[in-house]
Image (cartoon, helix red, strand yellow):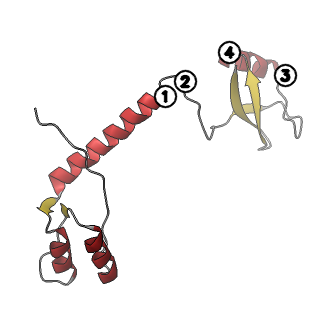
Amino acid sequence: MIAFDLVCSNGHRFECWFKDSASFEGQKSSGIINCPICDDNQVEKALSSFGIKKNGGRKREKEDSSQALRLAQEYLDKHFEDVGIDFTKEALKMHYGESKKRSIKGTATADEETVLKEEGVQFLKIPVIKRLDS
């Protein structure tokens, strides 16, 4: 069984269940699918707001998340200067015009993050993936 979100020619959205996609197409061409609001039989599939994954979906989600984090990490490595534990010091220097503004990355303690927030320095925390160099 499969559920499709449908819309009639009057713009009413509704859901119908079918044995399969071919069953939907056959019923649509026969004109036997009617809008429950206006009884219109000119219906089309509408974009659905969600999907249900079958077995293995969780593994795929983890792979997609890991891939996204890897891509973000590669971008940071390529386009940001790593200032390490001097992140707070460098960010404050740039904020107050004591050094040239540039894209930096590094680490900061919770106390240092509080200082940055209080000084109005914008920053973004991104999780770091531990990599094994082979």
In the rendered structure, the answer to whether residue 5 lies left or right of residue 127 reads right
* Circle 2: residue type: Lys
Q: Tell whether label 3 touches label 1 (CB within 8 Å).
A: no
Q: CA distance from mark 3 to mark 4?
A: 14 Å
Q: CA distance from mark 1 to mark 4?
A: 25 Å
Q: CA distance from mark 1 to mark 2?
A: 6 Å
Mark positioned earlier in the residue sequence (3 or 2): 3
Mark positioned earlier in the residue sequence (1 or 4): 4
Q: Nearer the viewer, mark 3 or mark 2?
A: 2
Q: Quadrant of the N terminus?
A: top right
Q: Tell whether label 4 touches label 1 (CB within 8 Å).
A: no
Q: Which residue is mark 1?
A: 57
Q: Which residue is mark 3?
A: 32
Mark positioned earlier in the residue sequence (4 or 2): 4
87 above or below 24? below
Q: Which residue is mark 2?
A: 54
Q: Residues within 10 Å of mark 4 (few under 14, many from 20)?
A: few
Residue at 25%, 67% (x, y): give it.
Answer: 109
